[in-house]
Amino acid sequence: MSSPKHENESNVGTGTTDPPTAGTDALLGTAKMPKAPRSKPKQSKIKMNFPMKLHEILANKEFEHILSWLSHGRAWRIVRHKEFEEKVIPLYFRHGRYSSFARQVNGWGFRRIRHGTDYNSYYHEHFLRGIPHLCSKMKRVTSEDVERLRTMTRLRLTFTRKAVTIRCHLLSIIRYYLKATKRRSVYRTRVCDNKTIIPIPPT
């Protein structure tokens, strides 16, 4: 039986060595695991929608003479349409026409004020001066929304017409009743003055 010393010498002579075990490397800390490359966090770019761009335009003091907020800050108005189409629209939008801009305004739910001191201005409940983050709550009006609005408008007009017709009929009935009551009271007064008993015809 050979001793450990002779075994080591035989290994050295042949040029072979015992392979290192995984347990030994783990204990000595010599085994190195490959490190995964660190991925840089992606910076999410916030895509500006139409209301955000419009809010940015209104905040630019360079365009105050072209379009601006009203004094209360709840509506805005275009003062010079030609300059707005030539100078402002090409800077912020791909199209260069005012008609396309007007379609965008209507498509995002802005309502045009047609009466009062705020005449010809535009209003939206989430589009306010100094609060641009509310623009994220605005949604583009779809064709279904437009059709629903048209249906509601038609129903409202139909109901209004019927209500007016019913009101006219009621007024006619009231007028007829008042005239009939007045005639009957006059007839009774004449009978009492003559002191004669005349049967009052049924109404």
Image (tube, helix red, strand yellow):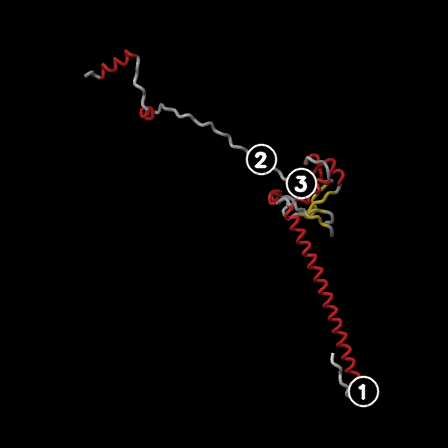
Tag 1's secondary structure? helix
The quadrant where residue 138 appears: top right
Any mark on residue 45, and which? 2
Q: Nearer the viewer, residue 56 or 101?
A: 101
Q: Do the residues labelled 1 and 3 touch (CB within 8 Å)?
A: no
Tag 3's secondary structure? helix
Task: Give the x, y percent position of residue 182.
Answer: 77, 77
Q: How crowded is mark 2: few (under 14 residues within 10 Å), some or many (20 or more)?
A: few
The tag earlier along the polypeptide, 1 or 3, is 3
The tag earlier along the polypeptide, 3 or 2, is 2
Number of the front mark, 2 or 1: 1
Query: Gap between marks 1 and 3, in whole Å?
Result: 85 Å
Give the residue type that dot 1 points to.
Answer: Asn
Query: Gap between marks 3 and 2, in whole Å?
Result: 18 Å
Q: Which quarter of the rendered picture does the N terminus lie within?
A: top left
Q: How crowded is mark 1: few (under 14 residues within 10 Å), some or many (20 or more)?
A: few
Task: Give the x, y percent position of residue 60.
Answer: 68, 38
Task: Give the x, y percent position of residue 100.
Answer: 71, 40
- Where does label 3 land, which residue? 54
Q: Which of 189 and 115 is in front in this view?
A: 189
Give the residue type that dot 3 points to.
Answer: Leu
Any mark on residue 168, and which? none
7 relative position to 141: left or right: left
- Where does label 1 land, which residue? 194
The quadrant where residue 201 appears: bottom right
The tag earlier along the polypeptide, 2 or 1, is 2
